[in-house]
Image (cartoon, rainbow, N blue to C red):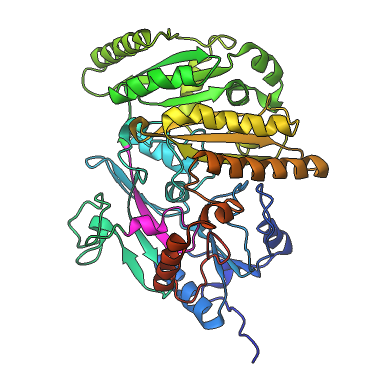
Amino acid sequence: MEREVFTNPLRPEALRTGAALLQSFAADESGAAGRVPSQVIYPQSREDVQRIVHEAIRTATPLVPVSSGPPRFHGDTVPARGGVIVDFSRMQRVLRIDRASRSVRVEPGVTYGELIPQLRAQGLRLSLPFLPRANKSVVASRLEREPTTIPKYQYDYMDPLLTLEVVYGTGEDFRTGSACGPGTLDTLKADLVNPWGPGSIDYFRLVSAAQGTMGLVTWAVTKAEILPRLQQLWFLQASDPARLLQPIDALLRKRVLDECVVLNRAALATMLAGDGMRDYAALARALPAWTALLVVAGYERRPEERLALYAKALRDITAAQGVEPGRSVPGAPGREAEILHLLSNAWTKSADWRIRATGSSRELLFIAPMSQVPRLAATVDDVAAQRRISMQDVPCYIQPMVQGRGCHCEFVFPRLPTDSAAAMELDALHREAAAQLLRAGAFFSRPYGDWAQLVYRDYADGVAALRRLKGVFDPHGLFNPGKLCF
């Protein structure tokens, strides 16, 4: 019997089938091998998403959700088995900014470039990932658990994601946490900021880092924070990241810091370099091997006094750790205001900071306890040395998470898209380093691409449980098949 063809259940203008557009979804920076989708469809409401899901069930068509603009890095939006791309970029309404509860409800097409100025106008800000590109979806970023640069406000690895609405693989919609009801959103008296439940299950965890395999999110509520009146940037420098993480741990335990991130010289030079990376080499020569960017802030109530108290605490705690903080970074004096601006806004110097050097890159990212990060980072250096690959121009950043209880560590390997031999060697390094990191104790909480095989191959019980859940929430197996362990 001939298989039925997916037919557009929405308006004619909601469907696109141009060859160039379809081809653009068949690959990304990860090098993942995928298939060209048959079409791209653009929902504009939850009802549109439900119609798409019902049509996919009728025709047994895979659905691959996408909400951020290019470039894309992880292979999670590359169709493994063809199907239809569900592009949420036209669902771009900011549904509610609630200053009293410090939260914002947005659709998945809302990007950092759009939301940051709207919140700033209300005296609010987001806890941002490190240099998020302007066309990155806020909802996708929260669902992917991208670490934010303000670990002080992160109480759980799911923070700052709160509640959400999701359409499951049956076509039914569901709201999590205090958004669950009873009643419609228009009649609901809850403020939508309690993420737990309904009942004893935290359903929002089931779609987190699921790469679109468990459901299609149609809106989400994320935390916002009060916009500082005053900010002060401090720097720590060292030749070894361990010398920086010890005082940072002490500072985070006392809740002194707002933004806090550790960069190697390649990452900081990439961040600060001008158009065309023209001054990258000079910056890389002049900057310290490792630099910590630390921000203290004063808010609406007595901002000057608060800033002075926190700056004193920073000086006292770092002095007790044998590290001297500075107000400017050697090799880039006078760039403090620019650094604060970059940390507080979406990245606009290029398509994404990760591809500034050569136009393409591969990421290697993991999380670990703060005390273990230097050892694990050295593992990557050792693998590169064995393969005679220079790490000199490989950006690395270390992001404390959950008030310092863990750290995200990310290496960004530049590569030339036209150099196939170097790309193959880099792919081999990428696979070997990931395998050695896993054996050494690194945790891949977002197992993209080949990492999924490493993570799940010795985890039979967990895989069985995940597949049972998949059978409940996506019984037809249509949501992004071929990803994770599905």
Residue drawn at x 42%, y 30% is 370
Residue drawn at x 43%, y 60% is 462
Residue drawn at x 71%, y 38% is 359
User: Quadrant of residue 50 in the image?
Assistant: bottom left
Can you see residue 346? no
Foreground of the two, 186 or 58: 58
Q: Position of residue 268 (x, y in %)?
A: 58, 22
Q: Position of residue 282 (x, y in %)?
A: 69, 14
Foreground of the two, 95 or 253: 253
Residue drawn at x 47%, y 41% is 112
User: Quadrant of residue 280 in the image?
Assistant: top right
Q: Is residue 61 left or right of residue 319?
A: right
Q: Is residue 333 left or right of residue 430?
A: left
Foreground of the two, 272 or 236: 236
Q: Position of residue 1 (x, y in %)?
A: 64, 92
Can you see residue 461? yes
Foreground of the two, 76 or 317: 317
Magenta-span inclusion, residue 220? yes
User: Quadrant of residue 297 in the image?
Assistant: top left
Q: Position of residue 363 (x, y in %)?
A: 61, 40
The extreme left residue here reads 189
Q: Which residues are magenta?
A: 203-224
Q: Is residue 180 left or right of residue 412?
A: left
Q: Looking at the image, is 300 positioned above or below residue 39?
A: above
Magenta-span inclusion, residue 410? no
